[in-house]
Image (cartoon, rainbow, N blue to C red):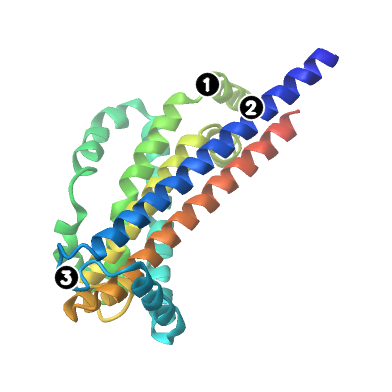
Amino acid sequence: MAYAKIGVEARSGLLATDRAKVMAIRIAIIVVMLALWEGASHSGLFFKDVIPSIATLAAALVRLLSGSPFYANLLVTAGEIAAAMAIGSVFGIAVGLLLGANPFLARTYEPYIYYFGPTPKIIFFSVLIMLYGVGPGSKIAMGAISCFFPIALSTLAGMREINPVLIRVGKSFSARPRHMVFKILMPAMRVPMITGIRLGLGVAIIGTLLAETKLSNKGLGYMVIQSYNRFDMPTMYALIIVVVSIAVLLNVLIERWSRSNSSDNLGSLA
């Protein structure tokens, strides 16, 4: 018993050391990148303000976050991304479940998902404008189409990794279709499905913002392209920093929710 306790403590110590090393490396990378950026801004190799100094960026970021127009445009973009993720996730998970449960449908339609998945979705934007207009609808559709494919493919991959015993157990208890989906299938493929949602979130943000830069009068993408047109590089970079920070924060929240959900499932099994 004592040896087991010592082994657990040793492993915990090694994990803590590894986490500290990983965090130190991450911080070092950020510091090096900031140093390179600052050096480039003072090197004279670029036109003025193409690469502003860190102090200039910080001042632009403070001005941006202090103004009300930023928050109004943030709400527009956040609403579009949330709607796009909701639509893309529902259809992506549904299609993944359907193809995973029916081998014939998978053989018939799965190639189309693989073929259209890597296609740049921006080429469909003109069609979406004709269908949904220049308002938020076309941006939401753009984000939904973008996130649909990784979510559908990840769900389909998760369906193929499910232990057939779980499905047979559900059928033996005459489980209804919705119980099979929500009580057996989705918990069993939680990891690949959440991976797909994380990937889908990234491309939904890209698709929505890209659509806003093309044709819009509101949203963070609109603010980015307007800053570029005015050659206000500090504000443009500040907006990019904000968008990247939001994307990172959302991914961290999804990852922590996934871990807590996994811990709860393990606890319930124990």
Q: Nearer the viewer, mark 3 or mark 2?
A: 2
**Residue named by callout 2:** 14
Q: Earlier in the sequence, mark 3 or mark 2?
A: 2
Which residue is rendered at x = 24% and y = 73% of the image? 233
**Residue named by callout 3:** 130
Q: Earlier in the sequence, mark 3 or mark 1?
A: 3
What numbered label is drawn on residue 163? 1
Give amino acid for label 2.
Leu
Quarter holding residue 94: top left
Whether residue 256 appears in this view of the structure is yes
**Neighbour class for label 3 at 10 Å: few (<14), some, many (≥20)?**
few
Quarter holding residue 135: bottom left
Give amino acid for label 3.
Met
* Image quarter hosting the C terminus: top right
**In the image: residue 22, left or right of residue 151:** right
Give the answer, above or below, for where 92 lies relative to 83. Answer: above
Q: How many marks?
A: 3
**Residue 109 image point, x, y percent:** 25, 35
Q: Secondary structure at mark 1?
A: loop
Q: Give the distance between the C-alpha atoms of the residues marked 3 and 2, in whole angstroms.
A: 58 Å
**Neighbour class for label 1 at 10 Å: few (<14), some, many (≥20)?**
few
Give amino acid for label 1.
Asn
Give the answer, above or below, for where 157 lies relative to 214. Answer: above
Which residue is rendered at x = 15% and y = 62% of the image? 45
* Image quarter hosting the N terminus: top right
- Front residue of 104 and 85: 85
